[in-house]
Image: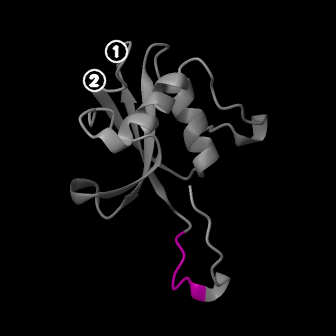
Amino acid sequence: MRATRVNEASAVSENHEAVFRVYLFESGTDAPGGSADTFDLVGADILQAIDWAQRKASPSGTYSIALRRGPETSAELDWLVGCDGNDAGVPALAPVMRRMLQRRDSRVRLAEFDHFHG
């Protein structure tokens, strides 16, 4: 991870209706990928999206969340939590995939007000 100080006025636009693309994988024991159910969440922030994904993922499954840019049919994705669990052949993603597997047993704890009710 790297943190760099920036000028807060450098943003040229803001979007208050983010769309989160959530992947729920039916994972194997050692791999976070497999078949996936995919959903777009609108009207949530990232904490609510994490809450929703954790509640919907099966006990043996994993999840990942991306910020979706562009239309549904030709989306660009910015990965926020995890990655495409089926990209197992990419060595640089090994630490990300390991964390995806570890989250099955160690869920992110959120306050009640951050639960997604949509």
Give the residue at x 72% y 35%.
Answer: 110
**Badge 2, how many Cα within 10 Å: few under 14, some, many 20+?**
some
Q: Nearer the viewer, residue 76 or 100?
A: 100
- Return the x and y of residue 46 as percentages of the image width and height: 58, 49
Q: Is residue 9 above or below residue 58?
A: below
Q: Which residues are magenta?
A: 10-15
- Return the x and y of residue 2 as percentages of the image width and height: 57, 61
Give the residue at x 61% y 43%.
Answer: 48
- Return the x and y of residue 1 as percentages of the image width and height: 56, 55
**Badge 1, how many Cα within 10 Å: few under 14, some, many 20+?**
few
From the viewer's perspective, tell me whether residue 57 is left or right of residue 35.
right
Per the picture, the main secondary structure of the magenta-coloured stretch is: loop
* Amino acid at pointer 2: Gly
Residue linked to disc 2: 34
Give the residue at x 77% y 34%.
Answer: 112
Are the residues at dot 1 and dot 2 in contact (C-beta closer than 8 Å)?
A: yes
- Return the x and y of residue 29 as percentages of the image width and height: 38, 12
Q: Hey, which quadrant is residue 87 in on the image?
A: top left
Q: Nearer the viewer, residue 99 or 68?
A: 99
Under circle 2, the secondary element is: loop
From the viewer's perspective, tell me whether residue 5 is left or right of residue 66.
right
Q: Hey, which quadrant is residue 113 in on the image?
A: top right
Residue linked to disc 1: 28
Q: CA distance from mark 1 to mark 2?
A: 7 Å
